[in-house]
Image (cartoon, grey):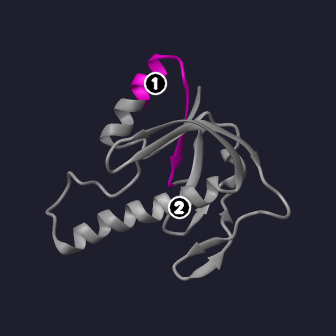
């Protein structure tokens, strides 16, 4: 399977990638820096940008990105960062994938995470392309290079 993973450098992401690669899956990572290889795709939830055209053709997308819950004290500010990091990333990835024809084959409910397994088929164009609503305004996803 061709699998895209956000949060690939975290504790869970690192272990998941190791397990999936040992089973022969092709792993691609969403990264917050300029990509160093073809298996890295740039995104920035803070800037609401993603390399949209690179999302086509994945069999599964796993979203694990977010502020670490293992580092630092859980002050009010830390709790806000944890929540906002998850909301921004989920919103961007969800809005980006809404621009594609997708086929869902399985859904796994993990309590605070829901995993949809399927295939990202093709980028929608023209009429019927969804508008994105973010922070009180309609927007378009900014293409990363």
Residue name at image x 83 percent, y 57 percent: 125
Q: Which residues are magenta?
A: 17-32
Say which element carries label 1: helix
Q: Nearer the viewer, mark 1 or mark 2?
A: 1
Q: Is residue 47 above or below residue 101?
A: below
Q: Nearer the viewer, residue 81 or 123?
A: 123
Q: Is residue 116 above or below residue 134?
A: above
Residue name at image x 58 percent, y 52 percent: 42
Q: Is residue 136 above or below residue 3?
A: below
Q: Position of residue 29 (x, y in %)?
A: 52, 41
- Which of the image's four quarters has the C terminus? bottom right
Is 45 a magenta residue?
A: no
- In the drawing, what numbered circle is on residue 86? none
- Which of the image's four quarters has the N terminus? top right
Q: Which residue is mark 2?
A: 44
Looking at the image, the residue that sits furthest to the bottom is 136
Q: Nearer the viewer, residue 126 or 35?
A: 126
Q: Is residue 51 above or below residue 39?
A: below
Q: Position of residue 79 (x, y in %)?
A: 24, 67
Q: Position of residue 19 (x, y in %)?
A: 40, 23
Q: Which residue is mark 1?
A: 20
Residue name at image x 41 percent, y 51 percent: 65
Say which element carries label 2: strand
Residue name at image x 53 percent, y 47 percent: 30
Is 29 a magenta residue?
A: yes
């Amino acid at each position: 399977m061709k699998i895209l993973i956000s949060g690939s450098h975290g504790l869970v992401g690192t272990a998941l990638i190791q397990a999936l690669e040992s089973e022969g899956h092709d792993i691609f990572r969403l990264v917050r820096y300029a990509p160093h290889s073809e298996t890295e795709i740039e995104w920035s939830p803070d800037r609401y940008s993603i390399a949209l055209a690179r999302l086509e053709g994945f069999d599964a997308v796993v979203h694990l990105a977010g502020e670490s819950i293992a580092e630092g004290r859980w002050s009010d500010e830390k709790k806000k960062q944890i929540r906002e990091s998850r909301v921004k990333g989920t919103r961007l990835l969800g809005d980006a994938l809404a621009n594609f024809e997708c086929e869902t084959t399985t859904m796994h409910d993990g309590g605070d995470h829901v995993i949809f397994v399927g295939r990202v088929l093709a980028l929608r164009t023209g009429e019927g392309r969804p508008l994105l609503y973010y922070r009180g305004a309609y927007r378009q996803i900014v293409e990363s290079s």
